[in-house]
Amino acid sequence: MYSSSLKFLLPLLLLLVVPRISVTGDDGGQDDPGQQWCIADVQTPDDELQTAINWACGQQDVKCDMIQENQSCYQPNTTKDHADFVFNSYFQNHKNKGGNCYFNGAALITEQDPSHDNCHFEYLS
């Protein structure tokens, strides 16, 4: 009699005792656990990323000035890092207007904030 009750209660007890683990890491104060950013796929060649950067920078509300020399998102000065910032800027400003994070297969969604150093990747709900 007791063993069948324990089999039922043990999983419930573990849920109460075992701490929750975040797959995306502990961000300490993320208000919206469904936050998403758009970044470049590391497998995409630089020439394809550059083509997508050029296209995105021609669109309205994309903050391409932030990846220019002496700006907060210039470093690291790689095509991939610049694509991360530009793709996300486009995605955040266009996702509610039918835009997406595809860039001809050069980008993907992440739930981990890609901001680094003084370079802040915006998130718009």
Image (cartoon, helix red, strand yellow):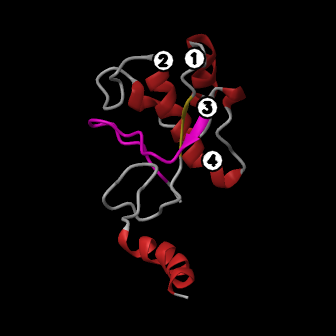
Q: CA distance from mark 2 to mark 4?
A: 22 Å
Return the residue at label 4.
Answer: 94
Return the residue at label 3.
Answer: 107
1 left or right of 119 in image: right
Return the residue at label 1.
Answer: 50
Return the residue at label 2.
Answer: 79
Q: Are marks 1 and 3 in contact (CB under 8 Å)?
A: no
Q: Residue 96 lies in what quarter of the image?
A: bottom right
Quadrant where the N terminus is found in the figure: bottom right
Q: Are marks 2 and 1 in contact (CB under 8 Å)?
A: yes
SS label for mark 3: strand
Q: Main secondary structure of the magenta part?
A: loop
Question: In this picture, which residue range is highlighted in magenta?
Answer: 108-123
Sequence-wise, which precedes: disc 3 or disc 4? 4
Check disc 2: other Cα within 10 Å, few if <14, some if 14-19, many if 20+. some
Residue closest to the eye, 57 or 88:
88
Q: Is residue 119 magenta?
A: yes
